[in-house]
Image (tube, rainbow, N blue to C red):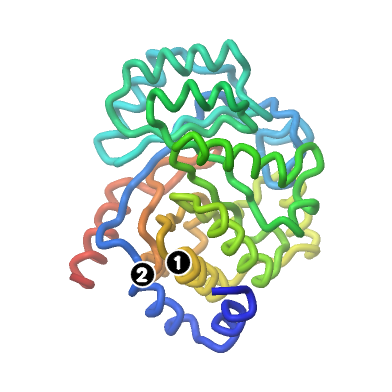
């Protein structure tokens, strides 16, 4: 499906029509993932949405790379509910000393792991291949709009990591954020770019504007509009329709869908459960109940 066909489908279909089209392509089950914020804050990048950036004054917790025992404890807890646990490290890229600590953690992990390590170098990717981890590197938005959300690194930097990981045979998780001021056309372009990259998993986040960030101020001043639930659902559905072979999962900010979270499952293959990087998520038991009820209905 090219851009014009996707755009025509989006503009000429109702939300429920798109969701039913997407339902045909979703996986049979819903995979669950969760994340650990293994190093928080002091990031020197200027992404407009990030509460961990040094360019923003937020009230988040700031700490260095967590001790191995603490990370393993968190992984063991989350793996009781999740199919995969992500280890996330703040900053442009993981430092050498931190990377050695990460390898020590991976030596003792049994569950499936995803690693979000920024603009990681090829040599480190080769090391991670030994552990068969999934590499996470969000493109955040499409190529054209990226300049509006970050100036300290480029869209091409992201693409380099994704392509190198794929070339090494690693699975890749890459998606982005809805509600950064982009149009639905931008989102469609983003989905097509992810399809071209042949990513395995696509996390969809809905902007959760945190006070002190640039995006918070832009929304507060009315320079960036808040997305309506209808537009979010349509965008999720068109992602699944375009990216038929990838796992489409909902992640941060899904609380803004309110009671329509269950409806979004029609176009989703996965859900991130538990807490996010610097914000709290929904009670895991509530999520499991919602997912199980949905699967009963469509079975």
Element assignment for label 2: loop
**Residue 84 placed where, x, y %?**
34, 38
The residue that disc 1 covers is 240
Q: Residues within 10 Å of mark 1 (few under 14, many from 20)?
A: many
- From the viewer's perspective, is 83 left or right of 227? left
Element assignment for label 1: helix
Distance between mark 2 and mark 1 Cα atoms: 7 Å
Extreme residue toward the bottom, this view: 12
The residue that disc 2 covers is 25
- From the viewer's perspective, is 52 left or right of 168? right
Q: Is residue 260 above or below residue 208?
A: below
The residue at the point 32 percent across, 46 percent down is 284
Residue 6 location, quadrant: bottom right
Of 186 and 62, nearer the camera is 186
How many numbered circles are shown? Answer: 2
Of 56 and 148, nearer the camera is 148
Q: Residues within 10 Å of mark 2 (few under 14, many from 20)?
A: some
Tell me whether the residue at label 2 lies in contact with that at label 1, contact meaning CB atoms closer than 8 angstroms.
Answer: yes
């Amino acid at each position: 499906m090219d851009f014009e066909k996707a755009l025509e489908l989006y503009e000429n279909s109702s939300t429920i029509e798109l969701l039913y089209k997407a339902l045909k392509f979703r996986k049979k089950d819903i995979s669950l993932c969760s994340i650990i914020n293994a190093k928080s804050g002091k990031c020197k990048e200027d992404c407009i949405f990030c509460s961990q950036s040094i360019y923003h004054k937020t009230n988040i917790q700031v700490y260095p790379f967590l001790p191995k025992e603490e990370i393993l404890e968190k992984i063991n807890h989350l793996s009781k509910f999740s199919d995969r646990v992500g280890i996330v490290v703040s900053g442009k890229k993981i430092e050498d000393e931190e990377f050695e600590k990460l390898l020590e953690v991976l030596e003792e992990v049994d569950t499936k792991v995803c690693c979000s390590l920024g603009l990681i170098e090829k040599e480190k990717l080769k090391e991670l291949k030994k552990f068969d981890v999934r590499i996470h590197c969000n493109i955040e938005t499409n190529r054209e709009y990226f300049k509006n959300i970050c100036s300290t690194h480029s869209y091409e930097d992201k693409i380099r990591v994704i392509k190198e990981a794929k070339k090494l045979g690693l699975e890749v998780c890459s998606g982005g954020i809805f509600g950064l001021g982009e149009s639905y056309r931008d989102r469609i372009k983003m989905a097509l770019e992810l399809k071209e990259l042949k990513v395995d998993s696509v996390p969809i986040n809905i902007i959760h504007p945190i006070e002190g960030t640039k995006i918070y101020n832009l929304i507060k001043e009315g320079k960036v509009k808040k997305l309506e639930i209808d537009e979010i659902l349509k965008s999720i559905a068109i992602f699944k329709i375009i990216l038929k072979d990838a796992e489409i999962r909902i992640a941060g900010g899904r609380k803004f869908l309110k009671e329509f979270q269950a409806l979004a499952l029609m176009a989703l293959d996965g859900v991130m459960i538990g807490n996010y990087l610097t914000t709290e998520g929904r009670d895991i038991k509530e999520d499991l109940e919602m997912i199980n009820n949905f699967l009963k209905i469509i079975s």
